[in-house]
Structure formats: C-alpha cells, structure tokens
Amino acid sequence: MRLCRVVGNVVATVKHPKYHGQPLMVVQPIDGGGRDVGASFLAVDRVQAGPGDHVLVLTEGTGVRQILELGTQVPIRSLIVGIVDHVDAAPEGEQS
Amino acid sequence: MYLGRVIGTVVASRKAQGLAGVKLLLVQPLDDRLQPTGPIQAAADTVQAGPEDLVYLVGSREAALALEPSFVPVDAAIVGIVDQVHTPERAP
C-alpha cells in the first residue's frame, strides 16, 4: 500500500457501470515526512476521506476487487482503504 | 487510474481476436493540473468519449476488465468522462 495525501476529487457523470456510486479522489504519494513523492493518480474512496487527509491506498487490482465485492470484472485498480492518523518515521538519512 | 485528454481516434481493421468492435482512441495522459505527462497512448473506450473530452482511464490488467469479454489484449481503457477535477491546493 502507498501512503498518500488526498488533493481533490473528480466528478464524472458518464462512467463505466462499476464506477457508479464510487467517489473518485486525486491522491498524491508522500514520504514518511509528508513530502510529495512522484506523480499523483486517481483512487476510489471507501473510507470517506477528504482533501488534506493522509490515507493508505491499495494499488493492486486483485485486492481491490476482493474488498469492493462487485464481482470479478471490476476495472478499478487503486482504492483508499484507510485514513492515517499518525506516522512515525526516522529522519532523512537514518532510515535503513 | 489517471486523467487524460482524447486527442484522436485509431482505426485498425486487422486486430487481435477479441478486439473486434472495440473503439480505440488516442489519449494524452494528464497530471492533476491537467498538464500533459508522459507519452501519448491508445486506449479502449467504454463510455463513448469523443475528441477533446477530458476522461479518466484505468491501466494494466484492470483495463481489460472494463471490456466484455475481458480476456483481451488491452492495457489502457477509458472508463469515465470527467465533468470537473476539484483540486483546491493545486490552484496556481
């Protein structure tokens, strides 16, 4: 799973049937210190996360399908599965 | 999943089995500021998107799961037409 920050949401009316009723958020991967790392991407939200929240994002399709329970034909690849309260990380340079 | 802009159509008369009738569009992937990022790609369309549309796509194995039948050789599929991207902290 990846540690990310929610930076916004995407509104779409016309979408694949499996996306109906699934909030879609823009998430930015971050490091242990909260700094942006790499490019943002989109993830379905199942935990009512909001902009600014630090979240855990599952980015493996099979696990996502097992959680969503929408059948086996689900074209969803990334899913917000938790809201992070706190991260303890060693300062830069001390990480092993 | 990621954002993209439809910039054209792809016509192929000889395709792999399973791709018959699948509409292919040319898409420029975008970041959350709607700026181009990465190379242009061809994607299967499941939502009747058209040129200039802002869309979102799913990649890898899950792209094929957007199609029926799903055992087809695609690795990018358009699964939504975007009305609005709301990212207040990215505002210039």
Image (cartoon, rainbow, N blue to C red):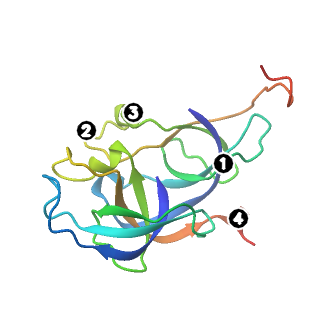
Q: Secondary structure at mark 1?
A: loop
- Left or right side of A27 for A59: left
Q: CA distance from mark 3 to mark 2?
A: 10 Å
Q: CA distance from mark 1 to mark 4?
A: 15 Å
The residue beneath circle 2 is A71
For label 4, the residue is B90
Amino acid type at image mark 3: Ile
Mark 3 vs mark 4, CA separation in Å: 30 Å
Viewer-side residue, A46 vs B33: B33
Mark 4 crowdedness (10 Å alpha carbons): few <14, some 14-19, many ≥20 = few
The mark closer to the camera, 1 or 4, is 1
B49 vs B46: above or below: below
Marks 3 and 1, Cα distance to the nearest angstrom? Answer: 26 Å
| Location of mark 3 (residue) | A67
Secondary-structure class at tag 4? helix
Dot in front, 1 or 2 = 1
Camera-nearest residue between A40 and B84: A40
Task: Check whether the beta carbons of the residues at disc 3 and disc 2 lie within 8 A of each other.
Answer: no
Q: Chain of mark 1?
A: A
| Nearest to viewer (mark 3 / mark 4) | 4
- Pointers 4 and 2 within a single chain: no
- Residue at image position (54%, 54%) is A25
Expressed as whole percent of the image width and height from the top left, the position of residue A95 reads 80, 23
Residue A38 bears which disc, if any? 1
| Residue B9, horizontal then vertical, whole percent | 31, 75
Q: Amino acid at mark 4?
A: Arg
